[in-house]
Amino acid sequence: MGKKRILITGAGSGFGEGAAIGLAQAGHDVVATVQISPQVTPLRQKAQAMGLENLRVEKLDILSPHDVANALHWDIDVLFSNAGRGECGPVSEIPLDLVRQNFETNVFAPLDLAQRFIRKFIDEKRPGKIVFTSSMGGLFTPAGFGIYVSTKHALESIAEALQGELKPYNIKVQTINPGAYLTGFNETMAETAFKWLDDSRNFTKRAELRKTFDALLGNDEGRLDPKEMIAAMIAIVPSDTGKFRNVVPKAVEDFLKESQKAAWENQI
C-alpha cells in the first residue's frame, strides 16, 4: 500500500476527524479539512499535542468556489470525500429549499470536487483514488429520512459510474457505507425536521415523527460505537485493493442484502 497523501473533507468532527488522526498515526500525509475557520485551530492543537507533524489542517468549505480552487494546489493521491449534511422529515411535506441545500452539499459539491481532482490526476498522468462517504441509507430508504438518503442513493450511482469510467486511467473509486454509529450526526439530523414541522399546518404530527426517529435511533443498533467505523476507514481509504462498496458493520451489510431482496416483493 505504501504511504499516501490523503485529503479528507468534513474532518471537523466525527468520522472525518477520527479518520484523519488515525491515518496520520498510520504514517500517511493527511490534509484534514474543515468547513469553518473556528474548527481549524482546535484540530491543529490536537494534532500538535499528539505529535502528528504529518497532519495538516486547512479550511475547505466544499460549497465555496474559492476554497475549492485553493484545494487544487495540494498534491494528493487520495480524495476522501466525507463532508455532508442531513435534512430529514416527511418527503411529502419537507420544504424544497432544504431538499436543494441537502443535494448541493451531499451530491453537487462532492461531484464538483471529485471532477476537479480527477482532471488533475489525468492531466498529471498519474494514478489516484476517490473515496466517498455514503451511508447504509444509500442502499435503503427508511421513513422520515428519505431526503438525506436520496442524496446518498445519488452518490452511490455517481460513484459506480465513475468507477467504470476511470478504470482506463488507473483512478480507483470506492464508497464507505456506515451503519447507525453514534457520532452525533444522526441525532442532529433528526432534529432538523422540528425546525419547520408545525402541528397546526402539517398533516405529519411532531409526536408521531419522534416515534419514527426513536424506533430507528433509540436503541443499541442505532447507537453503534464509531471507533469500529473509523478503524475501517483507516484501513480502506489508503488501500490499493478492496471492495467498491464497504458496509460496516457486517450485520448492517446482511440487513441491507435482505432488504434489497425483499424490495422485489414489495406490495403497494
Image (cartoon, grey):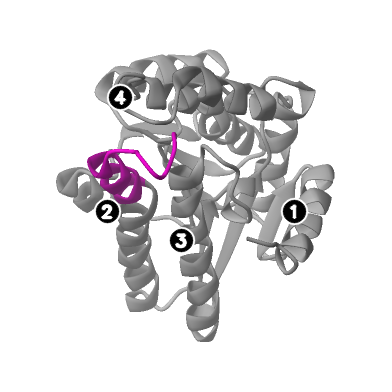
Q: Which residue is mark 3?
A: 154
Q: On screen, 73 above or below 166?
A: above
- CA distance for labels 4 and 2: 40 Å
Q: Which residue is mark 2?
A: 73
Q: Earlier in the sequence, mark 2 or mark 3?
A: 2
Q: Quadrant of residue 240?
A: bottom right
Residue 256 got which mark?
Answer: 1
Q: Which residue is mark 4?
A: 196
Range of magenta residues: 89-105
- CA distance for labels 1 and 2: 39 Å
The quarter in which the C terminus is drawn is bottom right
Q: Residues within 10 Å of mark 3 (few under 14, many from 20)?
A: some
Between 17 and 197, the one lying in front of the other is: 197
The quarter in which the N terminus is drawn is bottom right
Q: Nearer the viewer, mark 1 or mark 2?
A: 1
Q: Nearer the viewer, mark 2 or mark 3?
A: 3
At a point 59% along the width and 26% down the height, the residue shown is 213
Q: Amino acid at mark 4?
A: Trp
Q: Earlier in the sequence, mark 4 or mark 3?
A: 3
- CA distance for labels 4 and 1: 31 Å
Q: Amino acid at mark 3?
A: Ala
Q: Secondary structure at mark 2?
A: loop
Q: Earlier in the sequence, mark 1 or mark 2?
A: 2
Relative placement, left or right, of 44 versus 47 is: left
Q: Secondary structure at mark 4?
A: loop
Q: On screen, 156 above or below 40?
A: below
Callout 4–callout 1 Cβ contact below 8 Å: no
